[in-house]
Image (cartoon, rainbow, N blue to C red):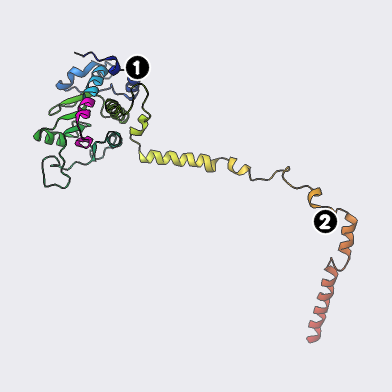
Amino acid sequence: MSTKLPPSLALREEDVRMMLACGVHLGARNLDPSMRRYVFKRRAEDGVHIIDLRKTWEKLLLAARIIVAVENPKDVCVIAIQASKALPIAQRAILKFSQHVGSTAQAGRFTPGTFTNQIQAKYLEPRVLIATDPLKDHQPITESSYVNVPVIAFADTDNNLRYVDVAIPCNNKGKNSIALMYWLLAREVLRLRETISRESPWDVMVDMFVYRDTEDSEKHSAESGVEGGFGGQTNYESSVPTLDTVPQSSEWGGEDGVPEDKEDSQDWKGTGQWSGEQDNKDNLGNWDNSVVEEE
C-alpha cells in the first residue's frame, strides 16, 4: 500500500518521463516471490514484468533519507562488482555518485573479507552499503549481514532480497536505467542536504552517469575527425588563389618594373649584353677548334 507524500516530495511528470525513456520500469521475465509486491503487471506480449514506478520513487526517497542520516559521507559504501566478460555498466555511475555525494566507491572487484577481516589492508567499516545488483554483489551483502550493516540495493524482479533492508525496484541490467537511478538518488541526497534547491533543476546531466564504451567512442571520434578534417574540401578552398587575388599587370609592370612595350623588349634581346646566344656559339666554336689542334 502506497503512502501519501507531501507535494514537495511527490513524483513529478518529468521524472516519470525520464524513467520510462531509460526503461526503469522494465523488469525480467522471472519473478522472485520477494519482489512480487513491487510488480504492477506482466506484459502479455513477451512476459516481462512491469515495475510500479510509484513504489520505486518511495523507496528511493527512503534510501536518500537513510544516506543523509549518516554523519560522515565516507561511511556510505557503494558497490558494483563486475562479472567476468561483462560490461562495467554501473562503474561510471557509482564513481559519479560518490563524487557528488562524497561516499566510498568499490568498483570492479571485491576482495572477500573486506568487511570482516581486520588484518586486510583495504578493511572497511561502512555504516551503510549500497549494492547495484543483489545477485552480483552477494559477497559484500553477505558480509554486511555478519557485521550488522544495513543494505540498500537496486533490485530487479528476479533478484532475491535476502539480507537486503531497503530494496529499490528498478531495472538494474540496463546502463541507462542504472545511471538514471544513481542520478536520481544523488540529486535527492543533495536536496535533503540543502546543497541544491528543489525549485531549480540540477545542473549535472544524466549523461555523465551513463557508461560509455571505449571502442564506440574511439570509432565515433575517428569518423568525426575524417569528416571534419580530411573528408571535406572546405579547409583547403580558402588557400587556393582565385583570379581576383592574382596581381594584375598594372601592379607589377610599368616604368619601375618590367616594361610593357614589346619593341623595347625586342631591342633588349638583340643586344649582346642581354642575350648570350651568339657569345655561347662563338665560345663553343673556339672550344671545338682547340680540341682538334691538340689532337
Q: Residues within 10 Å of mark 2 (few under 14, many from 20)?
A: few
Residue at the image position 82 percent from the left and 72 percent from the top? 280
39 drawn magenta: no
Between discs 1 and 2, the one toward the N terminus: 1
Residue 17: x and y, percent?
A: 35, 20
Determine whether, in the image, residue 24 is placed left or right of residue 137.
right
96 or 195: which is nearer to us? 195
Residue 91: x and y, percent?
A: 28, 37
Q: Which residue is mark 2?
A: 256
Tell me which corner region of the image, top left, top right, bottom left or bottom right, holds residue 62.
top left
- Quarter of the picture containing the C terminus is bottom right
Question: How much space separates mark 1 and mark 2, taking CA atoms?
Answer: 81 Å
Which type of secondary structure does the marked residue at label 2 adopt? loop
Q: Which residues are magenta?
A: 63-79
Q: Which residue is mark 1?
A: 13
Tell me which corner region of the image, top left, top right, bottom left or bottom right, holds residue 271.
bottom right
